[in-house]
Image: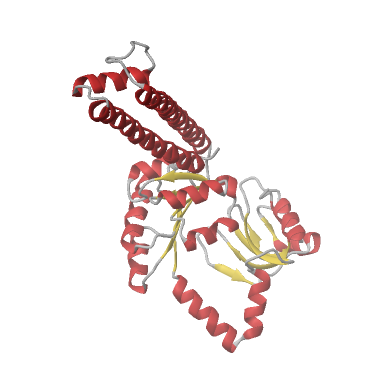
Amino acid sequence: MTRARTGRVAMDARQRVRVGLLLAVGVFALGTLWYWLVEDFGAVDALYQTITTVSTVGFGEVEPLGTRGKLFTIVLIFLGVGVVLYTIASLAEELLEHQFGRLGRWRMDRKIDALANHVVLCGYGRVGRGVVPLVDRDGLVIVDVDPERTARAEEAGLLTVLGDSTEDAALLQAGIDRAAILVVCLASDADAISTVLSARELNSGLRIVARANAASSEPKLRRAGVDHVVNPLALGARRLATFATQPAVADFMDVVAPDGPVEFRLEELLVPVGSAVAGSTLGEVALRETTGALLLAVREPGGAFENNPGPNTPLPEGATVIAIGTETQLEALAQRLGAR
């Protein structure tokens, strides 16, 4: 049972406990008023008779009861016992669900603690939910201050942290000090800047990608330590303009960078330390001929991209390769580079 489901069940149990307590008060009030007003008991005797009747301790009647009083007492016993059992069952359910919720949180924290070089996504709104299908779900932790959003993420099988990403505690709970990538998709640029500043202080080697809601926030986010700033509105506008003026280009981009599975895609690969091809040139390793993938650009560590690289382009350790191909071709290229 997920923490989201546990939380909803626990909330229902708490509501049932409240209802049970209200019903118990109603039963005691009904019994006391009956014995006081109808059976002409004193106020204390009426309350005493009600308590002994509902609790079924069997102390007997305070005053002799007629047929009407006995029939009412029978009904009061059934009502009282039913309400008490209902309340006790609801209370027990709440306690059990609370323990299950704590156990679920403990298990999730254990899974997060076992992660390293993972992705932390701050903000599970519309943009954040769009990021999830494009990253490794097993290495992803969602941080959001909204319990409904974290509940939705947990129902989708994702690891979550319910907390404010601008606070160090929430980021550390998500393992930001061990993470490789931080994606910030917050609705407030001020919160995004605060989150980035905290994350950069906790992990100086973190690669940070952030959403900018306003163009004026982009330079501020970069100064805060963001490596890549994305403005969804600006991207959407360029996309619309491309479809309007260069539809063939837009169609091609849909092929290589789609929303769903297609035949071709773009991929970024890194030449790792100790790779068998490190130190060679493209002509020497013949990556295109052996894998079928098309290399679009190569960037040496600290350098600029070399577009349409030729056979003399070197492949040092740490070089970044941008390639296009089918999933099989790109997998073969990754294995050839030693990136898998």
Q: Residue 183 versus residue 291: which sits nearer the camera?
A: 183
User: Residue, x 44% and y 51% (percent of image)?
Assistant: 148
Residue at 40% of width from left, 41% of height from top?
172
Please say if 49 is above or below 149. above
Residue at the far front: name it.
Answer: 67
* Relative to 44, 153 lies left or right: right
Scheme of image coloration: secondary structure
- Residue 194 at x, y percent in the picture: 32, 55
The reply to whether residue 163 is in sight is yes
Return the residue found at the far top. 59
Quadrant in the rendering for residue 331: bottom right
Is residue 91 shown left or right of residue 328? left
**Residue 167 position within the rendered picture, expressed as x and y whole percent measured from the top left:** 32, 47
The image position of residue 70, as x and y in percent, is 38, 22
Residue at 22% over, 25% down: 40
Q: Is residue 330 above or below residue 205?
A: below
From the image, which quarter does the N terminus lie in?
Answer: top right
On screen, residue 209 above or below 65: below
- Viewer-proximal residue among 136 and 23: 23
Residue in the picture at 49% in, 38% down: 6
Image x and y of residue 75, in percent: 41, 27
Q: Is residue 206 visible?
A: no
Q: Nearer the viewer, residue 164 or 196?
A: 164
